[in-house]
Image (tube, rainbow, N blue to C red):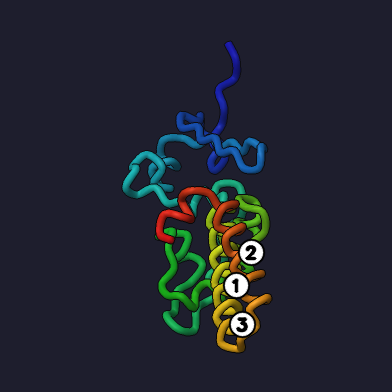
Amino acid sequence: MANPLKCDLCSKPATVHLTQIVNSKIHKVDLCEACAQAKGVTDPSGFSLADLLLKASLNPEPTGDVKCTACGFTAQDFKKTGRFGCSDCYTHFTRLLEPMLETMHKGSAHSGKVPQRALDRRSLYERLTRLETDLDQAIKAERYEDAARYRDEITQVRQSAGPQENAGK
């Protein structure tokens, strides 16, 4: 019979096994029933995402010496609740957050994401607006050759845009 796995915290036989995959790397945590209950793993409502992120069972406990000056929240408070006390906590706990974020994402700065079709549509709208403004100015200045060129370009842009862009025109 194979040796049973031991708890990563106390070396008793492990009965709770957690597996987390981060950046194609598998991280396993084995806990006994008592340690799993103490960490809140067996109670879904008490299970803290911060416990997984901090890998509390594998790394030393965060020290409580870092404290948010705005709300008084500590690293221990974050570990316990999985949440911060205020928006200033993100600044005060940067050293704690960056390693976690880097293992979960590409970098630690949020850059957002805009669908390419939305970018294309906005670019097309801006180009049409600029051409229409140029057309109005050319007409007011009685530069009819320029106005005709702007009109033709507007027509060409609208045709290349397809039916969804022409629906409101």
Residue 110 in view of the camera? no
Q: Residue 33 placed where, x, y %?
A: 41, 35
The disc label shown at residue 131, or none: 1
| Residue 70 vertical position relative to residue 111 in the rendered view, above or below | below
Residue under the point 59% across and 68% down = 151
Residue under the point 63% across and 64% down = 153
Residue at the far bottom in the pictured view: 141
**Does dot 1 land on a helix, a strand or a loop?**
helix
The disc label shown at residue 153, or none: 2
Q: In this view, does 169 lie to the left or right of 29?
A: left
Q: How crowded is mark 1: few (under 14 residues within 10 Å), some or many (20 or more)?
A: some
Distance between mark 2 and mark 1 Cα atoms: 8 Å
Q: In which quarter of the image is residue 26?
A: top right
**Does dot 2 land on a helix, a strand or a loop?**
helix
Nearer to us in this view, 46 or 115: 115
For badge 1, the amino acid type reads: Leu
Residue at the far top in the pictured view: 1
Earlier residue among tags 3 and 2:
3
The disc label shown at residue 138, or none: 3
Residue under the point 58% across and 11% down = 1
